[in-house]
Amino acid sequence: MKLLVVEDEAKLADYLRKGLSEAGYTVEVALNGIDGLHLAMEGDHDLVLLDSMLPGIDGLSLLAALRRTKQTPVLMLTARSGVDDRVQGLQSGADDYLIKPFAFSELLARIQVLLRRAAPRSTGEQTTLRIGDLEVDLLRRRASRAGQRLDLTAKEFSLLTLLLRRQGEVVTRTELASQVWDMNFDSETNVVEVAVRRLRTKLDVPFEHHLLHTVRGMGYVLEERPQ
Amino acid sequence: MKMPSLALGERLSIWLAAQTFAGLGLVSMVVYLFAAADLDARQTESLQHKRELVEHVLAEAHSDRDLPTLLHKLDDFFLGHRDMVLTLLKPDGSSLYDNASRPGSTSRFKKIAFAYPYWESAGGALSARMALDTAADDQFLHRLAIALMSASMIGALLVSAGSFVLVRLGLRPVRSLVAQTKGLAAQNLHRQLDGSQQPRELQPLVQQFNALLDRLSRAYEQLEGFNADVAHELRTPLATLMTGIEVAMRQPGLPESTLDLLGSNLEELRRMAGIVNDMLFLSHASSGAAARREPVESLAALAQDVSDYHEAAIAEAGLQLRIKGDAAGEVDAPLLKRALSNLLGNATRYAKAGSVIQIDIAAAPQGNASLSVCNEGPAISSDHLPRLFDRFYRADPSRAQASVNHGLGLSIVDAIARMHGGEPFASSADGTTRIGFTLSTGPHNSRSG
């Protein structure tokens, strides 16, 4: 997968290139709008990561110019959070947006969603998800570990499902709040931590191998780790 | 300055009453003295006149033969003048005529004495004493004094009452100014006082006040703009820092201690990012960003969503939650969720273990509603209550859990309430703290600033 990063902050662009390369993408970087537009028009990228404020041509104009000929998915990075900017960005043809400062793991997740949307997989939706001895039946909304039924609340089930679908990836608290509870704001409270802690007491505490791990400063990951 | 509590109206009316009383009293005194002097002169004149008459009668009597006729004439004469007394004494001291013992005569007299030079049989001059009874005149003067005194007092009272009413009427423009001033808040400093209905004396005050408002408003805007600029400028370096650290943490093979340090840094950066985002939100709100209203059928259902979000935290704190009441309307659901979430987080933090947190939703007339969260716990003193919604305000610094709470949560509630045309409120009594906000649930008058 080939990504184009258009970002005028050289350091940030560098970190993004590094991080995305390590995540397995081929990354090209442009440090201004003119280069960015040129590369986006000429190249064959699967996705463009576009800063909204750029020297040369600003992000929105670049997007408008690009959209005249190409339908490459665009993820906008914006430093503004005014509602109007958000609407403007989506109306001008961006497929998604992230407000700076963002969590890199969330950026990765958004990129994956956009890429998946662009190339839908032929495999149908799975009804049973597994990791280790954990099994989640999506249709009957049941979870069990080593054949033992887990007694989860509705929200705990959603939380587990989300982490399971993204197994091996770090999911941020902000993302969990948004996906599980539809709370789209950074909360001052530690409610997500408490919810994860309670899920963990049901999911992991009675068992020897722990699946749900906290990645300090980032979020949570569900994965099998060597003991 | 001795009586600072006395109102302008009272002070003026007391002063005017005293002045009026003094003025009227002076006039009354002059009138009284004039009347008294005049009466005295008349009495003297009247006595003089009677003396001439008596002398005339005496002159007609030439000998002792005429004495009965004289006495009779005198009796006749004084019959018509009951207020007069005449005593005629012969030179040897014996009485020739005396009507002092007549009934009806009183004790207050004005007297004159004169001698009648010639009386044949008396063998010398007659001495006469004539007195005029002045009781009637004295009574008149007495009544006049009372009347004048009462008139002065009543006049003073009337002036006092009148001036009180006039001052109240005259101060009406000032009251309207006060009402206008009350409507001013930090968010609408750009409003000006309307001085068009004000008297000329108050115009300079209104102008000065408006100029002051202008300066304040500019300063406030600059401050808000500064806040927004700072927050905005911090975003890019924060994004760079956070991305850099996260990318570094993804490198395989880092020692646990390094990962821990980086993670801890990332946590702090995330907190800073949270503060910056909240500050920007508040700046946007106070510079006029409006709520994006959409029809919401049940605020109770919305509150239930927020409660689900806090379910685990509430259960872990050993608390229960109840939602009471409902309302519908056009509101910005994500914003209301955010406000309610902040209130619930607050309530959970301070609620007494084992108690019940209650969300109250009340529909008010004219498309208004109120949302509030009520918890049992330590009371917030009344000095702190009005400042709870100030940015970064902490009622109790020792209890502030700085790691999870940076002190903007209630300011955001305040901003969201104002974006909905409402305002926040807080009360704390008898171990129950209630914090909430009002909002208009109609699409109209969404913002009053």
Image (spheres, coloured by chain):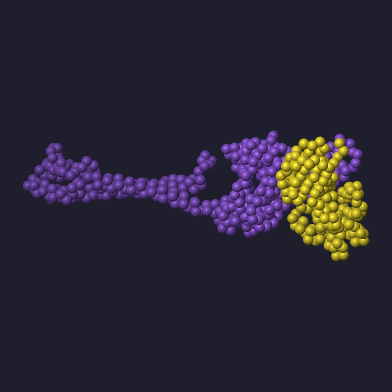
Chain colours: A yellow, B purple
In the rendered view of the protein, which quadrant contains the C terminus of chain A?
top right
Residue found 60% across the figure and 56% down from its top: B367
Of the pair B401 and B329, the residue shown nearer to us: B329
Apparent side of residue A37 relative to residue B305 in the rendered image (left or right): right
Q: Quadrant of residue B110?
A: top left
Residue found 66% across the figure and 51% down from its top: B302
In the rendered view of the protein, which quadrant contains the N terminus of chain A?
bottom right
Of the pair B51 and B227, the residue shown nearer to us: B227
Q: Decide if residue B240 is in sight here.
A: yes
How many marks do you count on the picture? 0
Residue situated furthest front in the rendering = A147
Rendering coords of residue B285 (x, y %): 70, 52
Residue found 44% across the figure and 49% down from its top: B160
Rendering coords of residue B242 (x, y %): 83, 45
Q: Decide if residue B231 is in sight here.
A: no
Apparent side of residue B441 relative to residue A80 in the rendered image (left or right): left
Of the pair A26 and A50, the residue shown nearer to us: A26
Rendered position, B94 above or below B329: above
Residue found 18% across the figure and 49% down from its top: B81
Rendering coords of residue B229 (x, y %): 77, 50
Apparent side of residue A105 relative to residue B345 in the rendered image (left or right): right
Residue situated furthest bottom in the rendering = A68
Of the pair A11 and B37, the residue shown nearer to us: A11
Q: Quadrant of residue B118?
A: top left
Residue situated furthest left in the rendering = B65
Rendering coords of residue A144 (x, y %): 77, 43
